[in-house]
Amino acid sequence: QLQVVESGGGSVQPGGSLRLSCAASGFTLEYYAIGWFRQAPGKEREGVSCISSSDMGTNYADSVQGRFTITRDGAKNTVYLQMNSLKPDDTAVYYCGLDYSGVCPQQPLRVADFTSWGQGTQVTVSS
């Protein structure tokens, strides 16, 4: 069972930044599309961003476009989500998952298209 590990969450003030990491051990992330999702209390898990295998493309939810950036580091076998200009509405548990096709689905991302979720990392944006 392939599994990823998310990290990098924390508590920040509005306007602050965080960088989340999605790391894998025992397999190579390069071959998979990686999706970042988030889930706020009482809400469904929603797609945030996706990066296709071999950096063939990225996409973003409208709510984070221009503020979040998804990238890969092949040497570290890690996918990052750089989050800038954070807002209270960004507060959620953030998860990453794998799309075995290697190609990002179009936004809005569907949970059903991804698998091998990690345990998530909490992001709290509050003054």
Image: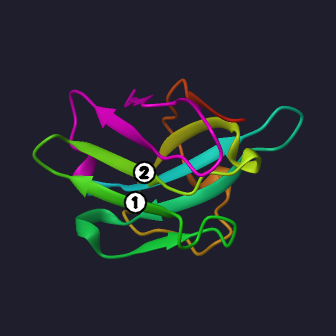
| Three-letter code, disc 2 | Leu
Q: CA distance from mark 1 to mark 2?
A: 5 Å
Residue named by callout 2: 81
| Three-letter code, disc 1 | Ile
The magenta stretch is 1-30
Q: Residue at x 61, y 64 (%)?
A: 64
Magenta highlight on residue 19:
yes
Does residue 84 appear left or right of residue 112 in this picture? left
Q: Residue at x 68, y 69 (%)?
A: 108
Q: Residue at x 69, y 66 (%)?
A: 63
Q: Image quarter for residue 53? A: bottom left
From the image, which quarter does the N terminus lie in?
top left
Magenta highlight on residue 4:
yes
Q: How many marks?
A: 2
Is 108 in front, or is 32?
108
Q: Secondary structure at mark 1?
A: strand
Is 27 in front, or is 108?
108
User: Where residue 86 sits in the image (x, y, percent)?
Assistant: 61, 51
Q: Secondary structure at mark 2?
A: strand
User: Which residue is at the far left?
Assistant: 75
User: Where residue 59 sits in the image (x, y, percent)?
Assistant: 50, 72
User: Where residue 78 sits in the image (x, y, percent)?
Assistant: 26, 42
- In the displayed structure, 56 sits above or below 33; it is below
Q: Residue at x 62, y 39 (%)?
A: 13
Is 2 in front, or is 51?
51
Tell me whether the residue at label 1 lies in contact with that at label 2, contact meaning CB atoms closer than 8 angstroms.
Answer: yes
Could one spot residue 99 in this view of the protein? no
Q: Image quarter for residue 123? A: top right
Residue named by callout 1: 70
Could one spot residue 92 in this view of the protein? yes
Say few, some or many: other residues with alpha carbon within 10 Å of mark 1 (under 14 / 14 to 19 / 20 or more). Answer: many
